[in-house]
Amino acid sequence: DAKTTQPPSMDCAEGRAANLPCNHSTISGNEYVYWYRQIHSQGPQYIIHGLKNNETNEMASLIITEDRKSSTLILPHATLRDTAVYYCIVRPNFGNEKLTFGTGTRLTIIP
Amino acid sequence: GAVVSQHPSWVICKSGTSVKIECRSLDFQATTMFWYRQFPKQSLMLMATSNEGSKATYEQGVEKDKFLINHASLTLSTLTVTSAHPEDSSFYICSARDSPRLEETQYFGPGTRLLVL
């Protein structure tokens, strides 16, 4: 079972920052938070991951609360190509632990 | 990021035939590969995990004799859908990880769309 809760859908205006929330209140100390997205009819694309510190890369920023029970993925300047389903996943940081996908958030960027 | 390819990207076959899907890691060696299936408007469901040189581990409810997985090399895993039926029509996606290291990122292929007539 997925250990995260995300809103089923969100809209964001093109050029604005898209903030996607994720609750993971039962996260364990050895579990990372991963974000992937899936554009229609494609395989999932890795975005970013983190443990407890905020992370930033060329695609997005990840803000993790101090208690690690929730996080927010931020796309700073959303474009139409960011329209996709975004998945927040928690996964232990060892061994062959698998990624278990929940239902994700369908983000629609509006022109 | 690392690149994972799949072949074919789509396939149409008659009921009762077998279909093989290839998954390759192009710029890294994948000690572990995963096979997922996705039905329309649903999320990805893990079917099995394969480690190079050993038998695949199947998720509950997935028939290992129907979905044959071979991970014979560090860059190639194959999924064979045997005696395919219309209910096997789905989007099959593989992913690969180069080692069970800490924070290891899993990269996904573009998917293979299977239609069984």
Image (cartoon, rainbow, N blue to C red):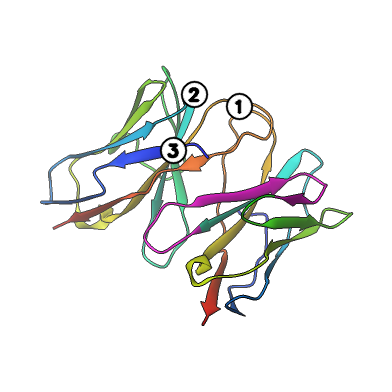
Q: Is residue B41 above or below residue B108?
A: below
Q: Badge 3, how many Cα within 10 Å: few under 14, some, many 20+?
A: some
Give the x, y percent position of residue A85: 52, 65
Give the x, y percent position of residue A99: 57, 44
What are the residue bounds of the magenta stretch? A38-56
Mark 2 highlights which residue?
B31
Mark 3 highlights which residue?
B3
Q: Which mark is residue B100?
A: 1
Q: Chain of mark 3?
A: B
Mark 2 touches mark 1? (CB < 8 Å): yes
Task: Using the numbered discs, state the Cα–Cα distance from disc 3 to disc 2 in whole angstroms.
Answer: 15 Å
Q: Residue at x 57, y 77 (%)?
A: A14
Whether residue A25 is visible: no
Mark 2 lies on a secondary structure that is: loop
Judged by depth in the image, the label closer to the viewer, 3 or 2, is 3
In reply to whether residue A45 is colored magenta, the answer given is yes
Q: Residue at x 19, y 47 (%)?
A: B84
Q: Is residue B102 above or below residue B66?
A: above
